[in-house]
């Protein structure tokens, strides 16, 4: 490994994934790198010029947000490296002559400006084309163009690439098979290497539970409502993810009706939440002992935030794709402690799901972890104990350890208690009602 890299970036060595990536790029091949956040993805393109024989060697990086570009530029500058992003006041000559090693930009900055277009076409010193946070290409390049039309440019990244001829490095957070396929198509990657980090989070036990279409939300969550009332500030922290703002509001209302003054332990976070409230929630969730015990949220709550002490993630309705699901369940157990992911769904939640997500939800026989990882060309570790893996494996566990049965989810414990109560006190309206709800299995 080049001494310069060690010195400049202050690292001892590359990870295997990093070395492999750089090796293929130097060999002139495209690389599709799926790596978890915090896995050192940026270092692969930052170190590239130090291994590249060509002089000058420039790197063009497509980045989804101006704030990320600015942050990267000032980081690289602080290491004594020459970096800039394309904007009105940037040093054009320095970029044109190859002095600026790292050039950050967005597709529209290039494609709407004939000058930059021709600079790129005429340049021969760009040796690497990078698309950072490429999963945003899918989310931004397609779909709701009405809300944010400028993001349609991300659908035209392939066009930018065609202006310079050099290998491409496409970096994404964990991406499922179907999203990888879509991305590669969009970016016209043909002869590429797929480098995928195992996305498994072994300390999260996986559960899936189907509920009846008309099952009341307050019933589905009665176990959590009781927990908040009994334990108040000591209630373990939960995040409930909902696929829409509407569902988010419905879940919040169900808690509100049951909880009265305890509602202060519950918060709601979605794209229409005011900035001030969002900030307050982020601050609270960043404290180990924050006041919020249950956060009911859409995917808007996920972006770039590391919530503390969350050991239970619940999905009330699956997100539309598996990547979103992986990112959201990954909120649990960041500190490495045993954590739980429980997905509730009813048949009305199954519309509009992508095929991988639907496959995961409908699976009832196969190990859920195995099913999940299949979509990422990965497999669970052979060492994982069955009673810690998922609800399917749990049933088959014959480890005979004393604590084998102690990793049940509160939802199922509560449910079996209600079942027992209702069979002995069938005169009570509430319990007989609920036992009916629980015992009737729903048909599709
Ligand atoms: Zn399993
Ligand atoms: Zn066991």
Image (tube, rainbow, N blue to C red):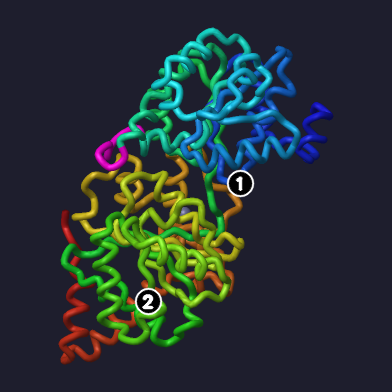
Observer-nearest of 390 and 317: 317
Residue 167 percent location from the top left of the image: 56, 17
C-alpha gap between disc 1 and disc 2: 32 Å
Residue 345 percent location from the top left of the image: 28, 58
In this view, the mark in front (1 or 2)? 1
Where disc 2 sits, the SS reads helix
Give the quarter of the figure containing the C terminus.
bottom left
Circle on res. 224: 2
* Label 1: few (<14), some (14–19) or many (≥20) C-alpha neighbours in 10 Å: few
Q: Verify CB contact (< 8 Å) between mark 1 and mark 2.
A: no
Q: Quarter of the image holding residue 84?
A: top right
Q: Is residue 4 magenta?
A: no
Say which residue label 1 marks. 38
Q: Quarter of the image holding residue 55?
A: top right
* Label 2: few (<14), some (14–19) or many (≥20) C-alpha neighbours in 10 Å: many
User: If you read the primary sequence from the N terminus, does the residue marked by circle 1 or circle 2 appear first?
Assistant: 1
Q: Is residue 144 magenta?
A: yes
Residue at the image point whose x is 56% and y is 44% from the top: 36
Residue 182 percent location from the top left of the image: 37, 29
Residue at the image point whose x is 39% and y is 30% from the top: 154
Give the quarter of the figure containing the N terminus.
top right
Residue 288 percent location from the top left of the image: 58, 71
What is the tally of numbered marks visible in this picture?
Answer: 2
Observer-nearest of 262 and 272: 272
Highlighted magenta segment, given as a residue range? 141-148
Circle on res. 353: none
Where disc 1 sits, the SS reads loop
Q: Main secondary structure of the magenta part?
A: loop
Residue at the image point whose x is 32% and y is 83% from the top: 259
């Amino acid at each position: 490994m080049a001494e310069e890299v060690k010195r400049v970036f202050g690292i001892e060595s590359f990870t295997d994934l990093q070395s492999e990536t750089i090796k293929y790029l130097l060999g002139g091949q495209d690389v599709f790198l799926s790596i978890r956040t915090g896995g050192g993805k940026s270092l692969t393109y930052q170190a590239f010029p130090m291994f590249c024989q060509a002089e000058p060697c420039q790197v063009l990086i497509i980045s989804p947000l101006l704030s990320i570009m600015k942050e990267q530029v000032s980081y690289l500058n602080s290491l004594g490296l020459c970096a800039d992003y394309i904007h009105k006041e940037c040093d054009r000559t320095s970029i044109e002559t190859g002095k600026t090693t790292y050039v950050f930009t967005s597709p529209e900055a290039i494609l709407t400006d004939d000058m930059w277009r021709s600079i790129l076409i005429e340049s021969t010193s760009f040796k690497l084309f990078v698309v950072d946070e490429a999963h945003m290409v899918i989310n931004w390049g397609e779909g709701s163009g009405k809300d944010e039309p400028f993001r349609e440019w991300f659908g035209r990244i392939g066009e930018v690439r065609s202006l310079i001829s050099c290998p491409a490095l496409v970096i994404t957070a964990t991406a499922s098979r179907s999203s990888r396929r879509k991305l590669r198509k969009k970016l016209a990657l043909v002869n590429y290497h797929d480098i995928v980090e195992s996305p498994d989070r072994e300390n999260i036990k996986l559960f899936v539970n189907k509920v009846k279409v008309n099952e009341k939300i307050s019933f589905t969550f009665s176990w959590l409502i009781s927990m908040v009332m009994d334990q108040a500030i000591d209630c373990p922290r939960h995040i409930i993810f909902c696929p829409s703002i509407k569902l988010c509001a419905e879940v919040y209302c169900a808690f509100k009706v049951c909880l009265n003054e305890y509602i202060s332990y519950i918060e709601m976070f979605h794209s229409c939440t005011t900035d001030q409230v969002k900030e307050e929630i982020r601050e609270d969730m960043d404290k180990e002992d924050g006041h919020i015990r249950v956060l009911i949220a859409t995917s808007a709550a996920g972006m770039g935030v590391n919530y503390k002490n969350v050991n239970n993630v619940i999905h009330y309705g699956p997100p539309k794709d598996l990547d979103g699901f992986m990112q959201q369940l990954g909120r649990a157990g960041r500190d490495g402690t045993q954590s739980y992911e429980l997905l509730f769904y009813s048949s009305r939640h199954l519309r509009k799901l992508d095929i991988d997500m639907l496959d995961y939800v409908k699976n009832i026989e196969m190990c859920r972890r195995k099913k999940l990882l299949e979509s990422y060309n990965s497999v669970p570790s052979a060492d994982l104990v069955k009673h810690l893996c998922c609800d399917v494996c749990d049933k088959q566990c014959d480890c005979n350890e004393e604590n084998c049965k102690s990793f049940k989810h509160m939802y199922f414990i509560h449910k079996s208690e209600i079942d027992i109560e209702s069979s002995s006190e069938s005169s009570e309206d509430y319990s007989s009602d609920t036992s009916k709800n629980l015992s009737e299995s729903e048909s599709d």
